[in-house]
Amino acid sequence: MIYNTSAFSFPGPKKENQDSYISLALDGDHHVICIADGVGGRKGGAEASMAAITEVKHIFSEKLFTTMADLFDRVHHTVLKHSKDIKFPEMSTTLTVVYINKDDVTIGHVGDCRLYHLRGRGIVTKTYDQSEKQKLIDDGVLSRERALYYHRKNILLSVISPDKKYELYESKFKVAIKDRLLLVSDGVYNICTKKELAMLSERALNVSQWMNDISSLIQTKEVKDDYTAIALEFM
């Protein structure tokens, strides 16, 4: 398969973008897209996300990738070492890695970035938010309507951090020609609904136009966080 990709990443009102990302073409029909979103409530969020992304890029560029479990273990050790070097013992980041091998997609995920799979007019979320809000929804404590106004919606239950264990979510699925993937940080999906993202995709002739349209939509609304998106289309 041939891949067509596009991406953007912009800071929120705090002017320091704690999101880091890569869209990396590998040998043959292989590609990797990845977003790390530094946890803003702790010092060193930007440094943590950059350390994670740098290690992911190193692993794939040097052909060291074996499993998602091994990759995340390497990233965790890198963040731990970096936190000691710069003396930020609580620095934390989310990390979502999407590895494409022809028509096979493998996800490794910690945190609350989201991967959407679009086919025709359909859009499906392929990741799971590891957040307090999502757990309360799953447990039946919060309805989805009440969850929209939940005051602790940004509290994460799993992150890459020197002082905490993380829970790795893994998944695999297949794609077809004309499918699109969209990987976003929470700064995107907290502003744009799935319906809006799917509608903009349907209208866009290519992923570059789609990214421009999403970015333009976000800028018409109240931006509260850094926002990053990577789109990939199968040709």
Image (cartoon, rainbow, N blue to C red):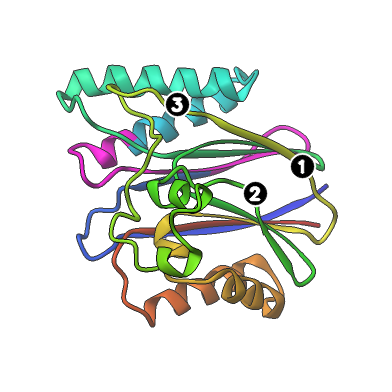
Of 227 and 196, the residue lying toward us: 196
Seen at 72% across and 32% down, the residue is 27
The stretch drawn in magenta includes residue 199: no
Query: In this orientation, which residue lies closer to the viewer: 117 or 145?
Result: 145
Residue 165: where, in percent of width, then height? 38, 22
Q: Residue tagged by mark 3? A: 55
Task: In the rendered view, tell whether residue 68 sits above or below residue 186.
Answer: above
47 magenta-colored: yes
Q: Which residue is drawn at 65% across and 66% down?
A: 207
Counting from the top left corner in percent of width and height, residue 150 is at: 34, 62
Residue type indicated by callout 3: Glu
**Secondary element type, mark 2:** loop
Residue 44 sits above or below residue 21 on the image: above
| Residue 148 in picture, x, y percent from top left | 41, 67
Number of numbered markers: 3
| Front of the two marks 3 and 2 | 2
For the residue carrying disc 2, how many other residues have a C-alpha within 10 Å: few (<14), some (14-19), or many (20+)? some
Q: In this view, does 150 lie to the left or right of 138?
A: left
Give, as a single range, the part of the protein colored magenta. Answer: 23-48
